[in-house]
């Protein structure tokens, strides 16, 4: 079993190095290999998605057939899955029936969830100080209020200091927020590089089976 | 010695056979006195108090032979060495003899027996001698119980009678008498002197000659024998002459008592003096305290035997100790206290001076030797030193707890305060039995039961309590929803309220310029990567841009990295078609390439080889060869061939992926991002960075409305702008007012409760 682990590690490292080197060195053969490898990732990812769908189906099938608690929802999920697969597969993803499912079921459902989120966030903001009354909570709440106030006119009234490209909202969004975002992006980039190097060096082996 | 009460008429303790009434003694033997004098240092001599002069001593004829024998064997000079090597002390002199000389009654020499007068001597005694005889005889009478209970304030014993001429008795004796008078004054038995004298005369005449001048002291038995035969014995003397039974023994002088019957105080004093003498390097006192075996008179020996306890019996002293207190009514044995020391003066033997009133003593262990036939032994120095010394002062003898232990076997049976023959460690004791069972108290048991119940309850799924049907949170949610709904529906119902559109920010202006710059009919790469839930915001934000592109007749190439992207793209196109009146319906206006799998890798692959990755379109015409071949994208080889790349997404990660993976491939093709308001902070750095990776940025409904303001006709954003303008302030007001109310409602009761607790 140890030899197979070595083989998988060798494959992973070699492919990663080829793709990485292909970014920096423009060689025709290297570019071709890189492209081939990248193209191979697409169907592999697609098949992985199918495997996930199959697993989801199996779990909920067991749940629905086993008569467990809340199995009706599993049955509904299975029905929805099968119906969508059948309709979309038969008519096409952009066929009217497929779009009808998307337009009248998927979009309304997800949009409703977002609308509930708005009410829940408002309620959470109301209870924030009650749960945790401290300086940072107050700053957080004040910043949210300022950003909201600067987003749109207050009942049609535009406040010079609040609204506009140079208002409070713009200043908050473009200076402190962007600064924080830059730091986050840098951290994410460095983390990605480190993770990639670890995989290339064989330290991390997420493909262990 | 034992401290138990005894009738006053008794001369000997009925419990321990100790002498209750001291006798006036003669000079002790030389050896004894000499040894004693060496062992008692002068510093240990208690202070002596002046006492009145004792009465005249007994006449020689009244002196018992044993006393006389003691005088013959002892050397007065030895007694004088006790303290400071002086001549024998005056305590041995009863009559008013000169200091340094023994009283006549104690100076009986074998050769002077004829000169000395015994109790049966035919010579007529002098008045003093008769008085002295009367005194000691009186003292030998058994005391009645009534007389014994007399308080100490009564007259002292007879032998310390005040009638005696004080000047004649030695000083030490006087002191003793005074002390005794002060401590235990007892009324002497009322015996008329005439009767006593008469009786004595009778005794003298009746006794055989050999007994008149006995070589040995006459014991009570012998006296009784003679008395029974010929003489009518007075009652007082008859009682005295009775065979001493257990508990009724004539009183012996303390210093003549054998070691078993010596008072505890004296023994203690002697022991302490012995210890000190040993420490000082002198000879111990033991040999001085204990008279020699051959000098013990018979009647005294008889007293010892009868006073001795039978084996196994409890000594009276033990009984006294067990009672826990000393009977103050008990006549304490004679010990040399300060008064006695004063009386005795400098001539007190050292061993006698060592008898300190502070030394309390219990019954000595040697006093318990009562087995018949066992002669008193000379105790070794170390043993004598271990004897507890009884205090002479009129205080209750101290009882050591250890003295409660009474020896039950062996030669020391009945004695108290004896060291065990074997240590406690070696004694065979049954090992204590410890219970193997765990001893658990009731409280521990209760705690264990509680703990077991808690552990057991952890494994059992507790039923989740049903929340109340109507809770405060539900009410608040409903209230917030109603307020927001009202504020949003109001402008929609009213219609266009003419709320001003915000100013065009630079990013929006750049985006507008980008779109304006593309040629008409150019190919536009349009990535629709937002979730259906964000359809309302994203479509409203991107509608103006897409409308602008449609107005320019651009060929839209729709692609998506989300699974619902193709459908979302179709929905977007159809919505704009419906709202703005466009007719983008077939492959000739737009191409929906579909979903790009593989995440970042697929996107990178698409960026490098779009035709290979997405060779087909969802709305392609099957009759044709393909839009990549003979359609509007036949001239497009790579992404560089597109005129503009527009990415519509609500996720900052998706935006970053397009920027990082596709942006380098795009080259000179501008990248325009239409993002939600939540992704703006993460995307703006790419717009504001240098080199500028994002050429245009439209963030949220406000920027979409601003872009729409640049267009000649309103679109979807303008329809939502009025409701948006009312809804946002309403939300702000809800948050502010609700926070204030919740804070006040939360902390006011707590403050009240804190005040209540403080007041309590």
Image (cartoon, coloured by chain):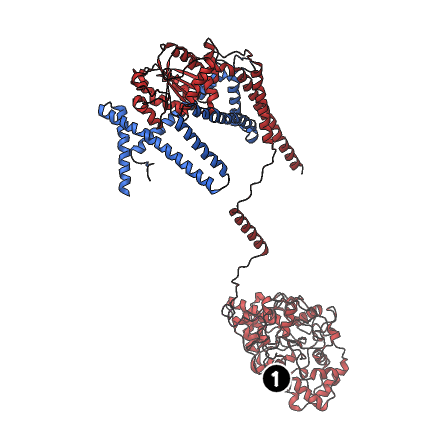
Chain colours: A blue, B red
- Residues drawn in magenta: B416-426
Residue B259 appears in the figure: no
Q: Quadrant of residue B38?
A: bottom right
Q: Nearer the viewer, residue B295 or B624?
A: B624
| Residue farthest front in this picture | B623
Mark 1 chain: B
For residue B3, side relative to residue B434 (left or right): right
Q: Nearer the viewer, residue B423 or B680?
A: B680
Q: Residue at x 31, y 29 (%)?
A: A41
B425 drawn magenta: yes
For residue B254, side relative to residue B534 (left or right): right
Q: Position of residue A113 (x, y in %)?
A: 50, 27
Q: Position of residue B39 (x, y in %)?
A: 54, 70
Q: Identify the secondary structure beneath mark 1.
A: helix
Quadrant location of the C terminus of chain B in the rendered image: top right
B456 drawn magenta: no
Residue A88 appears in the figure: yes
Identify the main secondary structure in magenta: loop
Reading the image, the residue beneath label 1 is B298
Dot 1: within a 10 Å radius of its alpha carbon, few (fewer than 14), some, or many (20 or more) residues?
Answer: some
Q: Which residue is drawn at 57% across and 55% down?
A: B445
Q: Where is residue B707 in the image (x, y as percent from the top left)?
A: 45, 12
For residue A201, side relative to residue B462 (left or right): left
């Amino acid at each position: 079993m140890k030899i197979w682990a070595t083989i998988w590690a060798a494959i992973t490292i070699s492919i990663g190095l080829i793709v990485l080197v292909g970014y920096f060195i423009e060689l025709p053969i290297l570019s071709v290999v890189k492209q081939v490898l990248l193209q191979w990732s697409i169907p592999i990812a697609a098949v992985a998605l199918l495997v996930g769908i199959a697993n989801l189906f199996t779990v909920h099938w067991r749940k629905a057939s086993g008569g467990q608690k809340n199995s009706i929802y599993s049955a509904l999920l299975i029905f929805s899955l099968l119906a969508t697969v059948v309709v979309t597969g038969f008519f096409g993803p952009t066929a009217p029936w497929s779009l009808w499912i998307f337009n009248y079921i998927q979009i309304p459902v997800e949009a409703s969830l977002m609308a509930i989120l708005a009410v829940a966030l408002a309620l959470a903001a109301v209870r924030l100080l009650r749960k945790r009354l401290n300086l940072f909570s107050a700053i957080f709440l004040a910043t949210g209020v300022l950003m909201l106030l600067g987003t749109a006119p207050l009942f049609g009234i535009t406040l010079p200091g609040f609204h506009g490209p140079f208002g409070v909202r713009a200043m908050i969004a473009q200076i402190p927020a962007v600064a924080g975002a830059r730091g986050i992006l840098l951290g994410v980039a460095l983390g990605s590089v480190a993770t990639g190097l670890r995989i290339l060096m064989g330290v991390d082996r997420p493909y262990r089976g | 010695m034992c401290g138990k009460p005894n009738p006053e008429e008794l001369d000997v303790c009925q419990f321990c056979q100790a002498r209750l009434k001291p006798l006036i003694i003669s000079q002790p033997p030389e050896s004894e006195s000499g040894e004693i004098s060496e062992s008692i240092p002068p510093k240990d001599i208690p202070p002596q108090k002046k006492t009145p002069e004792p009465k005249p001593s007994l006449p020689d004829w009244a002196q018992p032979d044993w006393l006389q024998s003691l005088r013959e064997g002892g050397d007065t000079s030895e007694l004088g060495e006790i303290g400071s090597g002086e001549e024998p002390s005056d305590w041995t002199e009863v009559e008013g003899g000169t200091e340094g000389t023994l009283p006549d009654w104690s100076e009986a020499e074998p050769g002077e027996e004829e000169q000395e007068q015994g109790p049966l001597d035919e010579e007529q005694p002098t008045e003093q001698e008769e008085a002295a005889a009367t005194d000691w005889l009186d003292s030998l009478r058994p005391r009645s119980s009534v007389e014994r209970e007399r308080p100490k304030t009564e007259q002292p014993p007879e032998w310390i009678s005040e009638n005696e001429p004080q000047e004649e008795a030695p000083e030490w004796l006087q002191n003793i008498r005074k002390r005794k008078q002060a401590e235990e004054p007892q009324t002497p038995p009322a015996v008329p002197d005439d009767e006593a004298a008469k009786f004595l005369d009778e005794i003298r005449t009746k006794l055989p000659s050999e007994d008149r001048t006995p070589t040995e002291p006459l014991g009570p038995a012998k006296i009784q024998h003679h008395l029974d035969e010929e003489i009518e014995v007075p009652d007082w003397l008859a009682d005295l002459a009775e065979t001493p039974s257990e508990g009724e023994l004539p009183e012996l002088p303390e210093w003549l008592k054998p070691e078993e019957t010596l008072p505890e105080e004296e023994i203690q004093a002697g022991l302490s003096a012995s210890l000190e003498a040993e420490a000082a390097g002198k000879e111990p006192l033991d040999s001085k305290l204990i008279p020699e075996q051959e000098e013990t008179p018979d009647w005294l020996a008889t007293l010892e035997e009868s006073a001795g306890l039978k084996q196994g019996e409890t000594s009276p002293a033990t009984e006294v100790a067990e009672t826990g207190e000393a009977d103050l009514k008990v006549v304490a044995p004679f010990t040399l206290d300060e008064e006695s020391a004063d009386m005795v003066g400098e001539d007190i033997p050292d061993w006698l001076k060592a008898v300190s009133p502070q030394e309390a003593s219990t019954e000595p262990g040697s006093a318990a030797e009562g087995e018949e036939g066992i002669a008193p032994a000379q105790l070794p120095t170390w043993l004598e030193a271990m004897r507890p010394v009884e205090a002479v002062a009129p205080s209750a003898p101290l009882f050591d707890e250890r003295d409660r232990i009474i020896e039950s076997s062996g030669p020391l049976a009945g004695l108290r305060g004896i060291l065990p023959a074997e240590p406690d460690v070696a004694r065979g004791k049954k090992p204590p039995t410890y219970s193997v069972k765990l001893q658990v108290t009731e409280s521990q048991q209760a705690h264990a039961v509680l703990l077991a119940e808690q552990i057991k309850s952890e494994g059992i799924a507790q039923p989740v309590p049903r929340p109340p049907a109507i809770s405060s949170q539900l009410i608040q949610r409903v209230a917030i929803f109603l307020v927001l709904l009202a504020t949003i529906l109001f402008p929609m119902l009213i219609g266009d309220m003419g709320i001003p559109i915000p100013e065009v920010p630079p990013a929006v202006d750049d985006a507008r310029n980008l779109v304006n710059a593309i040629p008409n009919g150019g190919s536009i790469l349009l990535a629709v990567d937002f979730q259906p839930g964000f359809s309302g915001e994203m479509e409203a934000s991107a509608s103006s841009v897409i409308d602008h592109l449609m107005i320019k007749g651009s060929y839209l190439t729709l692609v998506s990295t989300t699974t619902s992207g193709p459908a979302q793209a179709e929905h977007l196109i159809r919505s704009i078609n419906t709202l703005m009146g466009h007719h983008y319906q077939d492959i000739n206006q737009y191409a929906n390439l579909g979903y790009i799998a593989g995440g970042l890798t697929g996107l990178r692959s698409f960026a490098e080889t779009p035709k290979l990755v997405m060779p087909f379109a969802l709305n392609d015409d099957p009759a044709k060869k393909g839009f990549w071949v003979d359609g509007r994208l036949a001239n497009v080889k790579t992404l560089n061939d597109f005129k503009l790349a527009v990415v519509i997404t609500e996720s900052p990660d998706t935006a970053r992926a397009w920027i990082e993976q596709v942006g380098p491939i795009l080259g000179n093709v501008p990248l325009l991002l239409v993002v939600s308001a939540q992704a703006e902070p993460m995307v703006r750095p790419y717009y504001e960075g240098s080199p500028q990776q994002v050429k245009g940025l439209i963030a949220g409904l406000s920027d979409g409305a601003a872009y729409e303001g640049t267009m000649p006709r309103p679109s979807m954003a303008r329809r939502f702008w009025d409701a948006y303008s009312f809804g946002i302030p309403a939300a702000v007001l809800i948050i502010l007012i609700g926070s204030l109310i919740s804070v006040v409602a939360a902390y006011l009761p707590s403050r009240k409760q804190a005040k209540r607790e403080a007041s309590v």
